[in-house]
Image (spheres, grey):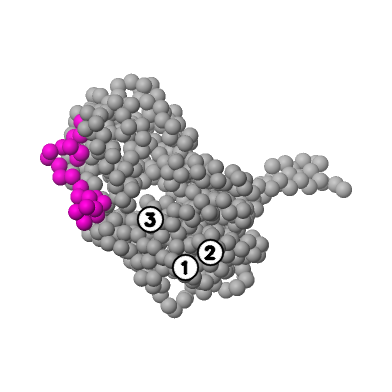
Amino acid sequence: MSPSAEIKPGHTDRLSFSTFHNVINGELTNTAETRHTLNPATCEPNPEVPLSTRQDLDHAVEAARKAQKLWAKTTFEERRKRLHAYADTLETYRDDFVDLIISEQGKAYGLAQDEFTRTLRAIRVTSNLELSEEVVEDSDERTAIVRYIPIGVTCALVPWNYPLLLAWVKMAAALYAGNALIVKPSPDTPYCGLKIVELGIHFFPPGILQGLSGGHDLGPLCTAHPGIDKISFTGSIATGRLVMESCAKTLKRVTLELGGNDAAIICEDVDIDKIVPSIAQLCFINSGQVCMAIKRVYVHTSIYPRFLTALVSYSQTLKTGPGTSSDISMGPVQNAAQYQKVQSYIDDIAKEGLNPVLGGLDKNDTPGKGPAEGKGYFITPTIIDNPQDTSRIVREEPFGPIVPVMQWSDEEDVIARVNDSVMGLGASVWSSDLKRGERMARRLEAGSVWVNMHFYVEAHVPFGGHKWSGVGSEWGVVGLKQWCNSQSVWVPKGV
């Protein structure tokens, strides 16, 4: 199939969501060995998926290198047409993918629906962006033009917290920019990634969009492979360091979206009853497993008791359970390793003498039942009252449903405390005075800052972290350019 071949959006056979395969050079492939994950809500096995080897990766890279040269010659309009046709067909699989998100990631039903909706919007908005040549000099002597050309063969290392959305954030930009892309889903959530690539067989030339499932050794094979020109990774800071170190050996382009320890500053002039539901939901969304979830809450001393009481009261209404139930607010933690990590922060309550006002060691709360009881990786919301700034729960990102709430009285001091972190992904200020809120937000050292909102992202606005929270950006024209090499073209006006 050439890049100019017709799209086949009306494929008659619906995708099967009971079997899962790699996609290499436009074909479904299997491997000699397979593996599976566990449904985090039940600890029961999900279906088998391929366990890819270096040879599988070599075949995918070879196919990508051959196909990309022709794909790069297509126009943005041609690529846009294919991406929009793909999104239209993907939309007919809403129920299938929502169920798949719940079974592999554990999301609550409403949040799984939201992830699917955001995915469709990300594809359509990204493929409507304009990436035009820029005339930076036009004098009597010469013209200087900056153009953006595809990097080549690229690879998306997708995290487990948003297996559909964060795959397509990378996929839409990579393909629209004219690259070939190999998608490597997280070993903990391989199912959505494999299935969206399988659907792509009907819309993209062989070798342009491929998918490989594997164990924890597959990611390092991708970052070290000399035939891959760019890696886009979303995940932890610790793994991000390893990705960057490996990519340096072959001087790959690299984009890293890493962890965050997002703070929310609550000013004394807020309407407590109005904002507390939003703050609670933003702390515990996806059981706290969102890089941009609120991880630290700083409340003005004058309203602290009332705010904390209201926050605890509302958080007690957040129902935890399997995501298949439509009335559930919080599903389980996604995997056993993350469950144990979050439990270690709960164990710190006794070790550090912390004061839990919800969850943790609170005798009035029912702790989440763990996998030993066969009931999934559930942890109920936990709120820590005014811990020291040196506490691990304040300094680190637990990536789970546990949040510290601290007091502040001086504006300069609270800004300094919020900025005293190696992380800088997002932060927010909440105030009835929008000018004050914006003034404070602009002083926060983070890639995204909000006033009276948090975790608000759109596909036309760039997103990336400062400090240890990442390298480069995704989303928007800024993110799209990072899937390209810039080229300066100098042309004289006369011979």
Judging by the rendered image, the residue that carries numbered circle 1 is 31
The first of marks 3 and 2 along the sequence is 2
- Number of numbered callouts drawn: 3
For the question of whether residue 199 can be seen, the reply is no
Marks 1/3: CA distance? 18 Å
Q: Which residues are magenta?
A: 355-378
Labelled pair 1, 2 in contact (Cβ < 8 Å) = yes
Residue 388 point in image, percent of width and height: 29, 26
Q: Is residue 401 above or below residue 25?
A: above
Marks 3/2: CA distance? 20 Å
Residue 492 point in image, percent of width and height: 81, 46
Q: Quadrant of the N terminus?
A: bottom right
From the viewer's perspective, tell me whether residue 442 is left or right of residue 178.
left
Residue 292 badge:
none
Residue 56 badge:
2
Which residue is at a point 20% across and 31% down the rendered structure image?
A: 355
Residue 188 badge:
3
